[in-house]
Image (cartoon, grey):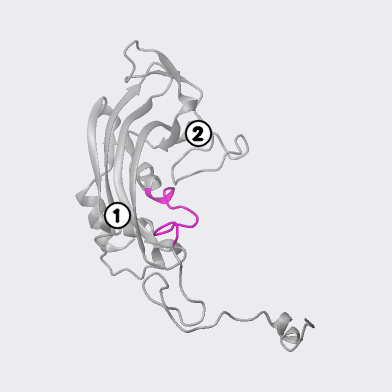
């Protein structure tokens, strides 16, 4: 991790002590940290963005965290919102595409020692520190007026060690999973000329469409009228 990313984490700590629960916290993600999280991803690297890149992305998560200590071990839960943005490259022209992010978060944190193993669950992991599968327990829904119980297998699951919960994997996931397979700056993006490389959205060129070499033999063919 780069020194800038380390400083970003220090300036915006993502650690919550279990003994502090229940609590409400805001977690801010800087552009330096987003750039570090997305480093090496084709749709980011294709931009050729400067370092630091203030337009890499940013976000804020507003979370209510609470614990359920009724069982043999403490499970923690987080409900809240995440808002932010990130910038990636258009898959056709390579220009910048700013994506607005807004998500409702419902997350379970459980001791890593209780997380299902790879042999027990086949569901793919979405983020570092995330559990494979779902927690099998119930908890009070703090957003519900009637205090109805909800199954935590409806929530995303992350693991934690000891007495501290690290929400960084949760926040990083909001950016990583938001990148589409083929982002577009606009639906009718014309892309780049395959021969000279000009952006056909903003200019034209005299390049001729290449002929399929398999059809070269037909160029001199004369069809009788």
Please state the extent of the stretch shown in magenta in the rendering.
175-188
Observer-nearest of 158 and 202: 202
Q: Which secondary structure lies at badge 1?
A: strand
Q: Residue at x 31, y 63 (%)?
A: 2
In which quadrant of the rendered image does the C terminus lie? bottom right
Mark 2 vs 1, N-terminal side: 1
Q: Is residue 194 magenta?
A: no
Q: Are marks 2 and 1 in contact (CB under 8 Å)?
A: no
Measured along the vertical axis of the image, is residue 79 above or below residue 48? above
Q: Which secondary structure lies at badge 2?
A: loop
Query: Which label belongs to residue 57?
Result: 1
Query: Which label belongs to residue 122?
Result: none
Q: Position of residue 192 (x, y in %)?
A: 46, 73
Q: Position of residue 147 (x, y in %)?
A: 35, 12
Q: Position of residue 55 (x, y in %)?
A: 27, 59
Give the residue pinned by disc 2. 115
Q: Residue at x 45, y 60 (%)?
A: 188
Q: Could you tell whether 153 is left or right of 45 in the image?
A: right
Q: Residue at x 49, y 31 (%)?
A: 114
Q: Is residue 186 magenta?
A: yes
Q: Residue at x 41, y 51 (%)?
A: 176
Q: Residues within 10 Å of mark 2 (few under 14, many from 20)?
A: many
Q: In the image as oriented, which residue stretches furthest toward the top?
A: 146
Observer-nearest of 202 and 219: 219
Q: Position of residue 161 (x, y in %)?
A: 39, 37
Q: Residues within 10 Å of mark 1 (few under 14, many from 20)?
A: many
Q: Is residue 41 visible?
A: no
Give the quadrant of residue 47. Answer: bottom left
């Amino acid at each position: 991790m780069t020194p800038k990313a380390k400083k970003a984490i220090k300036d915006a700590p993502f650690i919550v002590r279990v003994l502090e629960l229940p609590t409400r916290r805001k977690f801010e993600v800087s552009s330096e940290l987003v750039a570090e999280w997305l480093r090496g991803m084709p749709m980011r690297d294709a931009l050729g963005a400067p370092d630091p890149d203030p337009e890499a992305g940013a976000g804020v998560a507003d979370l209510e965290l609470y614990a359920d200590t009724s069982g043999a071990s403490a499970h923690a839960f987080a409900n809240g919102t995440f808002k932010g943005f990130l910038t990636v490259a258009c898959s056709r022209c390579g220009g910048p595409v700013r994506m607005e992010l807004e998500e409702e978060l419902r997350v379970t944190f459980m001791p890593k020692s209780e997380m299902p193993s790879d042999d027990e669950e086949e569901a793919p992991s979405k983020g570092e520190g995330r559990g494979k599968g779902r927690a099998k327990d119930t908890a009070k829904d703090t957003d519900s007026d009637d205090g109805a119980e909800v199954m935590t297998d409806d929530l995303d699951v992350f693991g934690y060690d000891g007495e501290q919960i690290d929400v960084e994997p949760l926040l990083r996931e909001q950016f990583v999973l938001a990148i589409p397979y083929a982002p577009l700056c606009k639906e009718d993006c014309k892309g780049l000329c395959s021969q000279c490389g000009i952006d056909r959205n903003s200019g034209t060129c005299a390049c001729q469409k290449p002929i399929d070499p398999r059809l070269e033999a037909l160029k001199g063919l004369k069809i009788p009228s």
